[in-house]
Amino acid sequence: MNSFFLFSLFLIILNCILFITSLLITFKSLKNREKNSPFECGFDSSWYTRSPFSMRFFLLAVIFLIFDVEIILLMPIIINLLFSPSIIYLSSSMIFLMILIIGLLHEWNQGSLNWM
């Protein structure tokens, strides 16, 4: 019981220290007007407020995010197949891979993966 209390007290103190540190860093960065501007790369924000945005770049970024999440979902499937090979895991992973490949082929046929 005593060790639980000491561990809880340690976590509370550590949490307070991290919270105060993050507040100090935040308040220190709020004072700098240059850092809070929307552009930090030397452009004056009043000149380029409405620059055209490439819709193709946006679609390619969304497709990348979708496939990136699917790749992350594949990693636990591979580890699970190594430690417990089962026909259920194998069939579900094959269905998932087929959906992934069909989606990739569809995007390729639609021309969404071409930049120009």
Image (cartoon, rainbow, N blue to C red):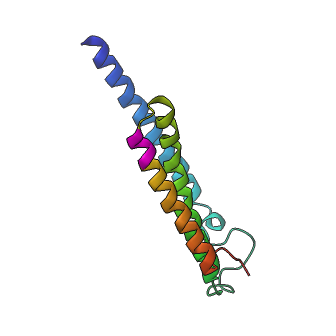
Circle count:
0
Image location of residue 71, percent across then percent down: 55, 52
Q: Nearer the viewer, residue 4 or 9?
A: 4
Residue at (35%, 20%) from the top-left corner? 7
User: On screen, 69 above or below 3?
Assistant: below
Looking at the rendering, in which quadrant would you find the N terminus?
top left
User: On screen, 85 above or below 60?
Assistant: above
Q: Quick check: 99 left or right of 7? A: right
User: On screen, 104 above or below 3?
Assistant: below
- The outermost residue toward the left is 1
- The span shown in magenta is 87-91
Image location of residue 73, percent across then percent down: 49, 49
Membership of 69 in magenta stretch: no
Prevailing secondary structure of the magenta residues: helix
Looking at the rendering, in which quadrant would you find the C terminus?
bottom right
- The outermost residue toward the top is 2
Quadrant hosting residue 62: bottom right
Q: Quick check: 45 left or right of 96? A: right
Q: Quick check: 24 left or right of 111? A: left
Image location of residue 75, percent across then percent down: 53, 43
